[in-house]
Amino acid sequence: MGILAYVVFFIPLITGDHKKSPFVKFHANQGLVLWIAFIGYIIISTVLSAIIKVPGSGFFYYVPRTPGWLSAILWLLSIPFIALDIMGLISAINGQMKPLPVIEKISILK
């Protein structure tokens, strides 16, 4: 269940396993915080992509598009989420309760 907290974060919450085991609760909390942060990132990047537009080119000249530099920056900013998810998975696979950097002090599950 600790591993599932990083893949499909809501399964340990639905089954109630986070209440039975401190290990599952720890990883369910970290997975939940990571997914909430990622959803926030998706919302912000979607709003930025919708606001910042440049004219298209060629046949699609009148179709505005997101500039390449913004797409590149948003893509680079998504990499830490993937890295944190992999770090959490490795920690759960090894049976450890290592807190993830940046989100280590945030606790949603009580």
Image (tube, grey):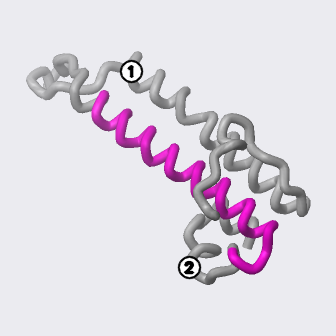
Residue at (44% x, 48% y) in the render: 39
Q: Is residue 12 left or right of residue 67?
A: right
Q: Is residue 64 left or right of residue 40?
A: left
Task: Tell me if mark 2 has few (under 14), some (14-19) or many (20+) residues whose alpha carbon lies within 10 angstroms of its own.
Answer: few
62 in relation to 83, above or below: above
User: Identity of the amino acid at label 1?
Assistant: Leu
**Residue numbers of the magenta segment:** 19-48
Residue at (17% x, 18% y) in the render: 55
30 in relation to 93, above or below: above
| Among the 4 quarters of the image, the one containing residue 63 | top left
Tell me the element at label 1: helix
In the rendered image, residue 26 lying in the magenta stretch gets the answer yes
Residue sitting at the far bottom = 15
| Among the 4 quarters of the image, the one containing residue 50 | top left
Sequence-wise, which precedes: disc 1 or disc 2?
A: 2
* Mark number, residue 14: 2
Residue at (54% x, 35% y) in the render: 78
Write down the residue under mark 1.
Answer: 70
Tell me the element at label 2: helix
Residue at (63% x, 46% y) in the render: 106
Foreground residue among 18 and 48: 18
